[in-house]
Image: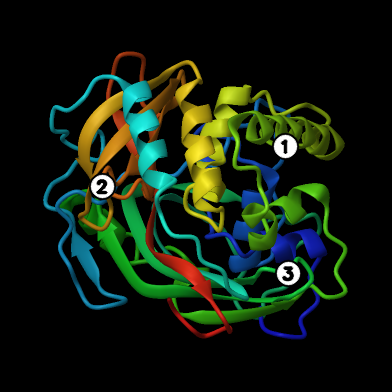
Amino acid sequence: MTSGAHVEPDETFAALKPAALETLADDGHHRRREHDLAHAMTAEPRTLVRRRARRRPSLLLAGLAGGAVVAAGGVAVTGGDDATTPPAVVAGPVDARSFLLASARTAERAPSTTGAYWYSRVREQRIVRTLVDKLSPGERPPKGWRPTRKDLPFTAYVTTSQDTWHGADRRSRARTVIGLDRRVTFRSPADEAAWRRSGAPELEEWSARPRTNDYDFRHTPLTENQQRSAPGALAEAPTDVAGLERLLRAWHRADDREAIAHDGVPTGMTFTETVFYEASNLLSGAARPGTRAAFYRLLAAQPGITMVGEVTDLLGRKGTALSMRSPDGEQRLIIDPGTARLLAHEAHHQVSPGGGTVRLLAQAVQAEGWVNAIGERP
């Protein structure tokens, strides 16, 4: 989408977040509506699949292990990785609470900055195992025809970067640039061979080339959930644990209200899941150092969060991973222990009880910070 195109306000606002993958829902991960809409905005217009099932927070995942580096738009094979084994970890502290409290002390010492726009570049890797059937150019759709999703005889990964400039003022302008530095990789040489036998189909048409999208929120009504993600709102979040917990519990209730209005059922998420999910806003967003410190302390008080140890993220950076498990799989936060900055999110889907996991989606923060104008970088 470019400037001047008509879209619904909630879809416009949601598009500022990196696109998630529709197949996550097919794998049993029911994402929040804003991430469904984000994909709808960066992909082609289509009807969103809405399931009356327990919804999960957006899942963000492990890096491409052993992937060969190729030119943008090229194709590579990932060194025989079967995508069912979690990344190797180095033994480290086993106490997640102690690590989080130490991260809080580090975070509150960081300098505080301001600006007119919050800039971020996020590197994202998505698993591709299905495609949507489409009509040929010029073909008239039969009566009652609707696009359907079909399984592919191979597993592939698409990796792209997205630049985002989001104004501090809730009524300001914004820009995204999607489809940057695109890479296509395969789980194994056999998967690449199966892709070629299938006619080498384009795996994600919406990300096949870079595209710039400009937005103007000056006359756009925003919902409560949309307003809270604005950089200016995050920069005003409480810097004490009690105040931040009250805010997050209000967000948790608002998510349920929106889910009931939208799907007829609540999200089914626990408060701990909401806190873990909001790390993407409060640890890698425009929140102040004091707010980040309070968030770490609040996260340390949540049950079920465990220490994984040292891992390598999508960009090859080492960090300390924390995990939250569910019957569906595992979510991870990867944190730089030296700076307390959030490096990446990870998600793995449980293939079978007691079995391996499949990496679904990875998002790694490449750069972020305040700037004074769209187009500038910190």
Image position, residue 259 (x, y; %): 77, 35
Which badge, 2 or 1, comes first in the chain's sequence? 1
Residue type of the residue flagged with mark 1 = Trp
Q: Residue at x 67, y 23 (%)?
A: 268
Q: Residue at x 41, y 46 (%)?
A: 107
Which mark's residue is nearer the viewer, 2 or 3? Answer: 2
Q: Residue at x 70, y 50 (%)?
A: 48
Q: In the rendered view, would you say 272 is above or below 311?
A: above
Image position, residue 147 (x, y; %): 65, 56
Occupied quadrant, residue 60: top left
Occupied quadrant, residue 323: top left
Which mark's residue is nearer the viewer, 2 or 1? Answer: 2
Residue type of the residue flagged with mark 3 = Asp
Question: In the image, which disc is placed on residue 169?
Answer: 3
C-alpha separation, residue under disc 3 versus residue under disc 1: 20 Å
Which image quarter holds the N terminus?
A: bottom right
Few, some or many C-alpha atoms within 10 Å of disc 3 (few <14, some 14-19, many ≥20)? some
Question: In the image, which disc is placed on residue 338?
Answer: 2
Occupied quadrant, residue 56: top right
Q: Residue at x 22, y 53 (%)?
A: 317
Which image quarter holds the C terminus?
A: bottom left
Q: In this rendered view, identify the residue nearer to me: 184 or 265.
A: 265
Q: In the rendered view, would you say 222 is above or below 224?
A: below
C-alpha separation, residue under disc 2 versus residue under disc 3: 31 Å
Helix, strand or loop for disc 2: loop
